[in-house]
Image (cartoon, rainbow, N blue to C red):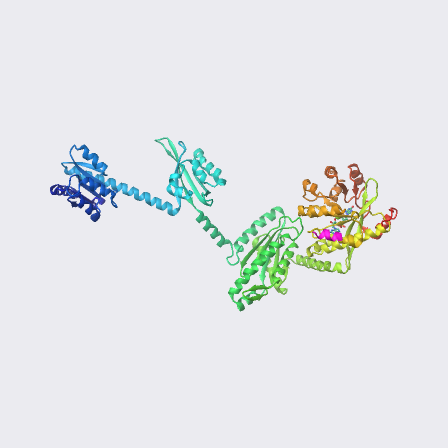
Amino acid sequence: MEKMEKTATVLVADDDELIRTFIRSALEQVGLQVCEASNGQQALEQFVLRCPDIIVLDVMMPVMDGYTACSRLRGSAGGGRVPILMMTGMDDADAIAKAYEHGATDFITKPLNHSILSHRVRYMLRGSRTLDALLRSESRLGLAQRIAKIGNWEWQPRTGQFSASAELCRLMGIRLQDFGGTLDAFLQAVDAEDRERVELALKRILTDRTPCDIDHRIMLPNGSDFIVNLQAEAVFDDQLQSLTIVGTAQDISERKRSEREIHRLAYYDSLTGLPNRVLFKDRVTQAIAHAHRYQYHLALLFLDLDRFKVINDTLGHNIGDLLLKHVADRLAESVRHSDSIGRSSDGGQTHELARLGGDEFTVLLTNLRDVQDASKVARRILEALARPFPVSGHEIFVTVSVGIAIFPADGESVDVLLKNSDTAMYHAKEQGRNNVQYYSNAMNAAANERLRLEGEVRHATEREEFVVYYQPQIDLCSGRIIGAEALVRWQHPQRGLLPPAEFLQAASDTGMIRAIDEWMLRTACRQNRTWQQRGLAVPRVSINVSNSLFHGTTLLKAVEATFVETGLTPDRLELELTESVAMRNVDTSITVLQQLKTMGVQLAIDDFGTGYSSLSYLQRLPVNRVKIDQSFVRDLLSLVQPVPIVRAIIAMAHSLQLEVLAEGVEDERQRSILMAEGCDQAQGYLFGRPMPAADLERLLGWMVLPKAG
Ligand code: C2E
Ligand code: MG
Ligand code: MG
């Protein structure tokens, strides 16, 4: 403070030269600089010229008196805050009052006392400096808050008062004067979803004195929002015995954005936007933990484009990069597409695609039921890349070599799996590129076997190698045959007669299942028509309908065409759908089934009890019959109490006016339990195994119905 006083300048305005000299000597003695004016007008001029830190102003002066000068000073630029000391006559109360009215800071009476004057001037200077410093620091704080987007606030829980700084109001999108001044007014600006959490955090400061540090959203009046970090703590004033919560709110949306950006840069490949090696390894590690816990397989596919270097060298890196982007897109598409691969009861399979760098990509397949599904996805990838890529006027053809490692068989850690899938990929290159290899030889053998089987299934229809077997269905009360289920068999040239378990999956994967089903439909209907014409008692035949046949209007058209072609009447045909087939798209199912029912076709739910369908859905399906799955029938002979399930299914079906048929009845005891429980019909080895048409005819020989037309 002393140092500052030395450089301070005092403007002394008085028309009396003697007084000016007197004042000058007094002030210069205490180290102040002095400049002079002999009237009000001059004082104004000197103020502009010298920018004094304080003004000592006489009241009575010629040209312009002290009051006028004082008011003018207050109104002039920079004159608002300069301390002005007015010299009045002794005991002149009017003059003192007038001096304050005109904006004087203080007054001093004449005659002047040397030391009182210098003390007064120095005291006023100090006061003004402190005020200046305070104002400066306040405005600096305001500026800092604006730059940092920090608003501060204080909440007095006792009075409920909540005061917000200008910046906080700005953040909330409210004018300072419009802010309500209560905690609720502040909470109104908090996004509705976060409001309760914020309020709780603030109230927790009161109860447990824990400082609060949370992020929440602020909702602006215009509907947009952003994230702030709210920090607050309790300040206890011992003297006033009062508690104040002081806090800040900082706009951190920018930080969040850059955090996201940093995350993107750290975990994603900038060329393709795919996850990079770091993120991929992280995801594999998580998937391993999950797969370990829930005991399922993972497959790691390692992809490397064939001869990518040649493309890069001949067409240049720019085109190479563009190609990689296209490849990434197509991979993403085919991997997404292959989500639907596998059985309809696909248990939440997910696929993760990543780019490891260069022309290397990886795919993680989780939740695999069958490790051979991995090669299905891989083959789909080969197919997807087989189409040419149009890049900058070039038509580029690329192929890819894929290596597959399976968890846990081929490794239990990311690194081992990556290494082994890479090794398998090299085998694929050695095999002539553009192919898929498992790390394990046994799996390669199985994959090849599967490929061969798929090839054979494709040709089996053309070579007419499929045959229909019929299994009788019996009415439990009368013991009569009420129908026959048509079951497909494959008369394989080398392997003999194969049951569906051996080839239906391959048929489904190759899309051949639909052709098989349509052939079964035609053949069984033609057979039944022949039986009718020969007067044999087969009231109806049942056909199993797969997902791919039960799609859109395919089934409806196939059934109509079959009736026209074979001349069979609709009531002689029953269609069996499993729950998963029927439930795949309930609304379409209902429409299609309704139309079939209107035609007079019988409908049954196959393998009932093994799916996940709820009773309410079953109620909506216009079916005639449910077939209790054979697993429940098998359980009827075990020691535990199995009857309740079967009883419940029968009761439920009957309440919906549906008939119930029990599958897989092999034993006399099963039959009697089922009869006692009120089951209507049965099918199983006890009554007859699936057999060729001719055998069924012999069985039917004794049951002749009136000849059909
Ligand atoms: P499903 O429709 O539930 O057929 C009943 C299966 O149980 C048949 O097996 C039948 O041979 C067997 N079975 C019948 N009675 C007994 C018994 O008393 N004990 C035992 N243990 N089994 C019995 P299959 O013929 O091997 O067929 C298996 C599944 O393949 C069928 O189950 C059906 O879902 C499917 N399937 C069969 N033929 C076709 C077809 O032409 N098209 C379609 N899409 N699927 C078919
Ligand atoms: Mg069936
Ligand atoms: Mg069944």
Q: Position of residue 651 (x, y in %)?
A: 74, 37
Q: Position of residue 269 (x, y in %)?
A: 51, 57
Which residue occupies the extreme right position in the image? Answer: 702
Quadrant in which the N terminus is drawn? top left
Q: Magenta-highlighted stretch: main secondary structure?
A: helix
Which residue occupies the extreme bottom position in the image? Answer: 314
Q: Is residue 555 magenta?
A: yes
Which residue occupies the extreme left position in the image? Answer: 18
Q: Position of residue 496 (x, y in %)?
A: 78, 57
Give the side of residue 661 with respect to residue 57, left or right.
right
Closer to the camera in the image, 614 or 180: 180
Q: Position of residue 455 (x, y in %)?
A: 71, 60
Closer to the camera in the image, 36 or 74: 74
Q: Is residue 227 magenta?
A: no
Q: In the image, which residues are magenta? A: 553-560
Give the side of residue 263 with respect to residue 640, left or right.
left
Give the side of residue 151 with respect to residue 272, left or right.
left
Give the side of residue 277 with respect to residue 698, left or right.
left
